Amino acid sequence: QAVYASIVKSQEVGRKQLAVLIDPDRLRTQSLEALIALAEQGIDFFFIGGSLLMDEKMEECLQLLRRSVPQPLVIFPGSPLQISAQADAILLLSLISGRNPDLLIGQHVIAAPYLKASGLEIIPTGYMLIDGGVSTTAAYMSGTQPIPPEKIEIAVCTAMAGTMLGLKMLYLDAGSGAQKPVSPEMIAAVREEVEIPLITGGGIRTPEKAYTNLRAGADLLVVGNALEKDPALLIEIAAAVRAAGNI
Ligand code: 1GP
């Protein structure tokens, strides 16, 4: 349980963490190479996955990362097709903001024997999609309705229920490429009621937003699109992540 243990340990000491999301479908080799070259600049994890994978690029991507960077590789799966023993861990997502039984238990049943055989560290994660102002691939592909951003109390109760069901982390996601990231008000309200590690992401494009959402109570920030477009932004985002921690 090395990945989860490191997230919990960071949370305990108030250190904030950064995961760079690599979506194998979207990423140009150039950006991946640039990110690899900057990997020492404050990346804690690489997350790999996407709501829709069009070809075999995921394995290639994992191979390249495994050869090139020391950080743990964590699968953020869009489907059971994205299980690979080349990674270190997988977020076993339960889409608790939605009411699609397939993404609450169905796909997990299909995946279970593969997950067991893979030897991956499995981190049961309550996944909450929050409406980010544009229709995201995640919302469309999951056939679920994201939580409206102003319905903070629904997000809080969903998070509480996820915790009571025994999930180990919560991921508040506005969806990849969201216009509006999850609001600091929603993050703070969820933080107030639950103790497990909180991940947030979706539409984070500036160090200021990274800082605000971590200060609001998230422990781990995920950034994808913005770094794919401009890998050099990593330096500023990583500095904001460090600054948001207590140490
Ligand atoms: C999406 O939270 C991640 O699931 C990352 O989103 O690509 O918008 O940074 P972005």
Image (tube, helix red, strand yellow):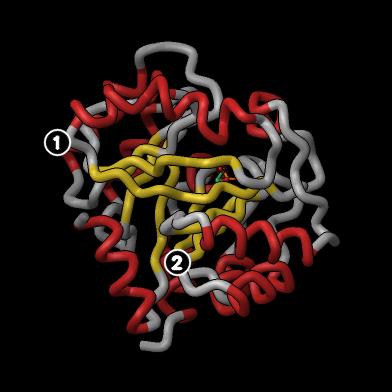
At label 2, counting other C-alpha atoms closer than 10 Å, the crowd grade (few under 14, some 14-19, many 20 or more) is: many
Please tell me which residue is depicted at 42% across the width and 25% down the height of the picture: 109
Which quadrant: the C terminus? bottom left
In the displayed image of the protein, which residue is found farthest to the bottom? Answer: 247
Please tell me which residue is depicted at 52% across the width and 41% down the height of the picture: 94
Disc 2 marks which residue? Answer: 197
Please tell me which residue is depicted at 78% across the width and 66% down the height of the picture: 153
Toward the viewer: 235 or 88?
A: 88
Which quadrant: the N terminus? bottom left
Query: Gap in Å between the C-alphas at discs 1 and 2?
Result: 29 Å
The tally of labels here is 2
Compared with residue 194, is residue 80 higher up or lower down, i.e. above or below? above
Say which element carries label 1.
Answer: helix
Dot placed on the residue nearer the N-terminal end, 1 or 2 = 1
At label 1, counting other C-alpha atoms closer than 10 Å, the crowd grade (few under 14, some 14-19, many 20 or more) is: few
In the displayed image of the protein, which residue is found farthest to the right? Answer: 150
Say which element carries label 2.
Answer: loop
Q: Which mark is residue 244?
A: none
Toward the viewer: 59 or 13?
A: 13
Asked if the residue at tag 2 contacts the one at tag 1, i.e. Cβ–Cβ closer than 8 Å, the answer is no
Residue 71 image point, x, y percent = 23, 52
* Residue 2 falls left or right of residue 179: left
Please tell me which residue is depicted at 41% across the width and 58% down the height of the picture: 168
**Quadrant of the displayed image that contains ligand 1:** top right
In the displayed image of the protein, which residue is found farthest to the left? Answer: 67
Q: Which mark is residue 67?
A: 1
Amino acid type of the residue tagged 1 in the rendering: Arg
- Please name which of the two marks, 1 or 2, marks the residue nearer to the observer: 2
